[in-house]
Image (spheres, helix red, strand yellow):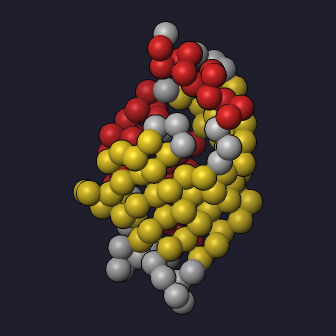
Amino acid sequence: MTTKQLCTDYLNALNEGDLNAVRAMFAADGTVVSPLYGERPAHDFYADLFADTRQSVTTLLNVFDTSESSNAVALHFRYDWTLADGTPASFECVDVFELNDTRDSFTKLTIIYDNAPLREDFNRLKTG
């Protein structure tokens, strides 16, 4: 599997809310660093994200692959996220993935975006 295919499969699984597919793309000890959720084991992060999500639609804008110098790839995409309570949140973000040595699974994801516009809605969702 190519790195580009792994990234495309990731966005498709995110859009479909396919928890098992996303988890399978991460190493067992993989981690996610998120502006809203903090640093978490990847398997826990996605369970919480999907529980907080009614719908996800991603639009890929760019792929930055540094395969010649490191095991990292970054996806720049538009994320149209509908929270579980129906509140829409749309923003551009960059997901920076660290890959295992064979570049066929993720070991770490750092998510980068400005969460200020949706922080209030997210906090309301989490506190009820």
Give the total of numbered labels: 0
Residue 105 spot, x, y in % from top left? 38, 66
Tell me if residue 18 comes above or below residue 48 in the rendering: below
Residue 11 spot, x, y in % from top left? 56, 52
Residue in the image at 50% along x and 73% along y: 72
Residue in the image at 41% along x and 71% along y: 99
| Residue furthest bottom as drawn | 68
Residue in the image at 33% along x and 40% along y: 44
| Residue furthest top as drawn | 128
Q: Is residue 120 visible?
A: yes
Q: Is residue 22 visible?
A: no
Tell me if residue 127 comes above or below residue 69 in the rendering: above
Residue in the image at 30% along x and 61% along y: 27
Give the image quarter of residue 29: bottom left
Query: Is 16 left, or right, of 47 in this rendering?
Result: right
Tell me if residue 28 comes above or below residue 40 in the rendering: below
Residue 94 spot, x, y in % from top left? 63, 57
Q: Quadrant of the N terminus?
A: bottom left
Residue 17 spot, x, y in % from top left? 49, 38
